[in-house]
Image (cartoon, coloured by chain):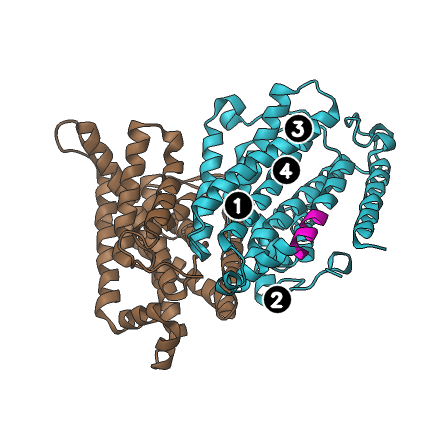
């Protein structure tokens, strides 16, 4: 039982990182119907921006909650800029092109960031320094709550609250939701589609950047190919929850994080990566809209 | 001259070409007349082993690209798991040849390896095809991506085929001549399919499934056929790969490989057979050609240029280099 609770805590921490990445996937898919494969790599770049920020901008900072917030904000800003550049130069010229072209472009951008990352950051893994005072909180009965895990929960929770405020309570959010219903109609009623798409990319990329830093905190070894698998899994989480659905992305991510930890803990860690794909296939064959998605199946 | 005769002539021409090519590039150890009966021995050819292996890789990539063209370009089924079929082919063929027929004559190994690889991949293609044809568009892509990765992870956990270490000591029997010849054979088969009744039915489904259905085409049937043929060919490509490298590991068959094959299609022009060949050519040769750049700059920028080329082609020429056109020798007339 104790073991189960311990796995649950670890799974929730992993799930909340997936959730932050999945939100970006699901938002971009909502407005553009694009699987933004480069998103996982924006997450990776965010992680590295965090690392270089600590190393060169605030080299003498003590690990504290203030340092952590500074690093996260820096990573969010850097990733958002990267998201804007990608949107403007790679995706915008293709707005009217067939969807497969945009998808290939996304894959191309993803490769560009990975190999460019190897060029700029170096191919070997680097150590992500502690940005938070590390404490193991023993909450009784042999269950240990890592203070970093607690931070990851809280940070993710705060960011998701900000996001849900933006999407459901502001004019921008209303426009974004209108675009995800129908881009043409939104355009007709006077919504500046390009601007909203740009802001969507900014928000999505900023969340990925924050996730990058939190990932570095939890698993302090980062390399330029880091974004590949978490990116794909976050995408699966978004599909599981119902792609285009923001609450769904969070629920999907938490389910995925938990089930991965359980499989690694109780069965075998080599099959951990296969689990996400099994979930993907089962969901798409049984309920293609995802858990919270609409039941509308795409007709040919 | 009848159409069949022309094709036959083309066939013989390429066989002769393969013999000559093998002779020039492989030298006397790949004895010209014994193209299919002699295993490649010590390398004494006119070109370096490096170029030799790049050319073999080119042939394999062309097979992968044209086989995916049948699914993606012709039938309009967007799949992202082609590397999985290739993996099944490679592992099946490698196991059959090295466990069952290690000492058999070369030609027996070639036939047994390729056929078993094709059948195994085709069978899995059939199962995947029938189970996910309800899905369309991106969803089909995601499911096939998932299947491709699951196949890879399962292979990674099978200890009999080496697991994470990969499979070593696979009999090497493919040489440049045989790869070249069989690549041409497969291109011609796909050409015959795509300009034949089946290919036209596939195209009709891509353009408008409902209209195709009204005209008496059974879309599900045709789609499954497309899946099976395509995965069969990918399996054969995997078999060639295993028996020209002599070593396979699951690292080769990740989803990046599937993306690479899709990129070949799209760069060349989706739906064009010539484009699929051209795309395979460009995306195979470009990273190798850029090694020279690396020597000059001292930095590994070739993959960056490769990725950048992919993005630029998509932005500047979204229909791909060939568009819908075909080279003359591959066109329907």
The picture quadrant where one finds residue B60 is top right
Give me the chain that's brown: A
Which label's residue is closer to the chain start, 4 or 3? 3
Q: Is residue A46 visible?
A: yes
Categorize mark 4 by other alpha carbons within 10 Å: few (<14), some (14-19), many (20+): many
| The stretch drawn in magenta includes residue B134 | no
Q: Which mark is residue B112?
A: 3
Local secondary structure at mark 1 = helix
| The stretch drawn in magenta includes residue B193 | yes
Chain designation of label 1: B
Residue at the spot of label 2: B317
Contact (Cβ within 8 Å) of mark 4 with mark 1: no
Tell me the distance, in whole angstroms, between the alpha carbons under discs 1 and 2: 23 Å
The picture quadrant where one finds residue B136 is bottom left
Q: Where does the image place residue A11, in percent across and percent down from the top left?
A: 26, 39
Establish if B237 lies above or below B91: below
Span colored in magenta: B187-196
Residue at the spot of label 1: B256
Which label's residue is closer to the chain start, 4 or 2? 4
Tell me the distance, in whole angstroms, between the alpha carbons under discs 4 and 1: 19 Å
Local secondary structure at mark 4 = helix
Contact (Cβ within 8 Å) of mark 1 with mark 2: no
Local secondary structure at mark 3 = helix
Residue at the spot of label 4: B236
Tell me what residue is drawn at x 79 percent, y 25 percent.
Answer: B41
Q: Where does the image place residue A33, in percent across and percent down from the top left?
A: 41, 62
Categorize mark 2 by other alpha carbons within 10 Å: few (<14), some (14-19), many (20+): some
Chain designation of label 4: B
Contact (Cβ within 8 Å) of mark 4 with mark 3: no
Contact (Cβ within 8 Å) of mark 3 with mark 2: no
Chain designation of label 3: B
Tell me the distance, in whole angstroms, between the alpha carbons under discs 4 and 3: 11 Å
């Amino acid at each position: 039982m104790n073991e189960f609770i311990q796995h649950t805590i670890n799974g929730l921490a992993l799930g909340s990182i997936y959730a932050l990445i999945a939100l970006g996937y699901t938002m971009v898919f909502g407005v553009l119907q694009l699987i933004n494969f480069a998103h996982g790599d924006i997450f990776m770049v965010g992680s590295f921006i965090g690392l270089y920020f600590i190393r060169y901008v605030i080299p003498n900072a003590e690990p504290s909650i203030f340092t952590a917030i500074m690093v996260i904000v820096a990573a969010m800003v850097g990733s958002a800029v990267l998201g804007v550049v990608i949107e403007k130069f790679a995706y915008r010229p293709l707005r009217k092109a067939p969807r497969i072209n945009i998808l290939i472009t996304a894959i191309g951008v993803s490769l560009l960031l990975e190999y460019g990352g190897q060029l700029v950051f170096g191919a070997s893994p680097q150590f992500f320094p502690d940005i938070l005072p590390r404490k193991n909180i023993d909450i009784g009965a042999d269950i240990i709550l890592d203070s970093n895990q607690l931070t990851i929960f809280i940070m993710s929770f705060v960011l998701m609250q900000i996001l849900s405020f933006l999407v459901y309570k502001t004019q921008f959010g209303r426009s974004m939701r209108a675009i995800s219903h129908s881009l043409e109609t939104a355009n007709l009623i006077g919504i500046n589609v390009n601007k909203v798409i740009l802001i969507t990319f900014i928000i999505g990329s900023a969340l990925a950047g924050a996730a990058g830093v939190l990932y570095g905190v939890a698993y302090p070894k980062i390399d330029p190919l880091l974004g590949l698998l978490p990116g794909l899994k976050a995408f699966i989480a978004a599909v599981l929850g119902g792609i285009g659905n923001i609450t769904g992305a969070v629920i999907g991510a938490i389910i995925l994080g938990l089930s991965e930890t359980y499989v690694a803990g109780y069965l075998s860690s080599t099959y951990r990566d296969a689990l996400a794909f099994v979930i993907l296939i089962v969901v798409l064959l049984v309920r293609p809209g995802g858990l919270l998605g609409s039941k509308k199946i795409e007709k040919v | 001259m009848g159409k069949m005769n022309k094709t036959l002539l083309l066939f013989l021409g390429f066989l002769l070409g393969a013999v000559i090519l093998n002779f020039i590039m492989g030298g006397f150890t790949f004895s010209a007349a014994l193209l299919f009966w002699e295993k490649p021995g010590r390398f004494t050819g006119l070109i370096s082993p490096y170029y030799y292996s790049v050319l073999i890789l080119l042939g394999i990539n062309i097979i992968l690209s044209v086989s995916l063209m049948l699914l993606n370009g012709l039938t309009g089924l967007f799949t992202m798991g082609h590397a999985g079929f290739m993996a099944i082919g490679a592992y099946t063929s490698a196991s059959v040849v090295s466990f069952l027929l290690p000492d058999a004559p070369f030609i027996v190994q070639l036939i047994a390896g390729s056929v078993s690889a094709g059948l195994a991949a085709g069978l899995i293609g059939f199962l995947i095809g029938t189970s996910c044809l309800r899905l369309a568009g991106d969803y089909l892509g995601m499911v096939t991506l998932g299947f491709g990765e699951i196949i890879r992870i399962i292979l990674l956990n099978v200890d009999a085929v080496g697991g994470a270490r990969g499979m070593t000591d696979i009999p090497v029997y493919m040489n440049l001549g045989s790869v070249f010849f069989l690549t041409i054979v497969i291109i011609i088969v796909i050409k015959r399919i795509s300009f034949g009744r089946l290919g036209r039915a596939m195209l009709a489904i891509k353009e408008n499934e409902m209209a195709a259905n009204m005209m008496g085409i059974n879309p599900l049937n045709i789609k499954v056929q497309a899946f099976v043929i395509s995965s069969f060919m990918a399996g054969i490509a995997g078999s060639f790969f295993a028996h020209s490298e002599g070593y396979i590991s699951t690292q080769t068959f990740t989803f990046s490989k599937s993306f690479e094959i899709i990129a070949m299609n799209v760069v060349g022009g989706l739906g064009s057979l010539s484009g699929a060949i051209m795309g395979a050519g460009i995306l195979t040769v470009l990273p190798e050609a850029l090694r020279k750049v690396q020597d000059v700059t001292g930095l590994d920028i070739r993959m960056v240029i490769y990725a950048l080329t992919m993005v630029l082609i998509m932005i500047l020429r979204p229909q791909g280099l060939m568009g819908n056109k075909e080279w003359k020798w591959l066109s329907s007339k």
